[in-house]
Image (cartoon, rainbow, N blue to C red):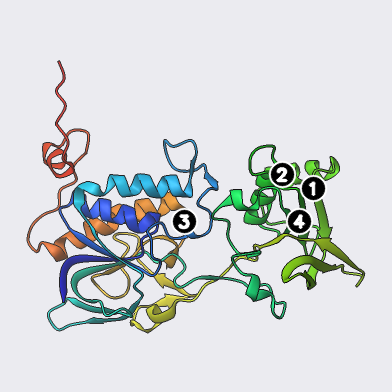
Amino acid sequence: MVEADAVVIGAGPVGLFQVFELGLLEIKAHVIDTLPYPGGQCIELYPDKPIYDIPAVPVCTGKELTDNLLKQIEPFGPTFHLGHTVMTLEKRDDGRFAITTDKGGDFLAKTVFIAAGMGAFEPRALALEGIAKYRDTQLFYSVKKPALLAGKHLVILGGGDSALDWALNFAQDGPNKAASITLVHRRDGFKAAPASIAKMKELVEAKQMRFVVGQASAYAEQDGQLSSVTITAPDNSTQDVRADAVLVFFGLSPRLGPIANWGIDIERRQLKVDTEKFSTSVPGIFAVGDINTYPGKKKLILSGFHECALAAFGAAPIVFPGKPAHLQYTTTSTKLHKVLGVETPTFD
């Protein structure tokens, strides 16, 4: 059994930054994640997609953000348990939490931080019988290696940010440019950034890509390969569109999974927390990032980072009873410089 001051469930950006905030308070963390690598949705869904709203970082990809966070937490030596799904979490009489995973992991933690995004999420699938056999070869629910789709005839399904972002990405001149792009959405209206919508319409007008209103209703094969997709319009007319690959962006279907059985107050598949220390209804269990809900909640990475700082300070009295947790600044605190393994600067 692993005994820990803190167990962080989820190794996405918010979970990784939780490790940092705990480390500043000298609380060592063990991190558990279902995925076999850290990064969460940033790596699983959009490793190469640019992110623009990280403070002081004008632009970075999901992979770059993950890599930088991993580098930032190196001084604190967190222990990762990847490829593990937490199955049970029970509070013991001594106040600690017994945690088990599906791979035989066994933990006893003073505090628990749930940073599991939307829980056990999975993409909403394209409901065409038999097409699942092409998944990860010609059918994709995320784009991990854009270069593999360069020069291909692409059919992109969806009307949100991901669908438009990737349509624009593959339409640009460069090494990843597609041979053709057909964007398909069930209606002539989008839930995406206005600038992306405007750019898409501009490219359609310039005949650099196509937009079709309708839904994928069938597909055809040739020589054992997916060759085309049939699109049915609202008036029931159909057209066959050449497809070397189909990219599906229908959003995620969130499932709390085992979390729903842990005795925590839940509201609309999210964990209710206070805004003082982001504690759940169970003292000692904190929830940060997209998994939590409170009045005014905004599902932004930067909001999750703020939540991590307050959650760490909320946990400190539990980990170190009777020891005050003073707010210190990394710019001036010699103690934090020692924790971070950096030299204290001197000024003339």
Q: CA distance from mark 4 to mark 1?
A: 8 Å
**How dense is the environment of label 3, judged by Cα within 10 Å: few (below 14), some, or many (20 and up)?**
many
Q: Which residue sits at x=35%, y=56%?
A: 307
Marks 4/3 in contact by CB < 8 Å: the verdict is no
Q: CA distance from mark 4 to mark 2?
A: 11 Å
**How dense is the environment of label 1, judged by Cα within 10 Å: few (below 14), some, or many (20 and up)?**
many
Helix, strand or loop at label 4? It is strand
Name the image quarter holding residue 162.
Answer: bottom right
Looking at the image, is mark 3 or mark 2 earlier in the sequence? 3
Looking at the image, is mark 4 or mark 1 earlier in the sequence? 4
Which is in the foreground here, disc 4 or disc 2? 2
Q: Position of residue 229 (x, y in %)?
A: 79, 67
Disc 2 marks a residue whose amino acid type is: Ala
Looking at the image, is mark 1 or mark 3 earlier in the sequence? 3
Marks 1/2 in contact by CB < 8 Å: the verdict is yes
Marks 4/1 in contact by CB < 8 Å: the verdict is yes
Q: Position of residue 20 (x, y in %)?
A: 26, 51
Q: Which residue sits at x=39%, y=81%?
A: 258
Looking at the image, is mark 4 or mark 3 earlier in the sequence? 3
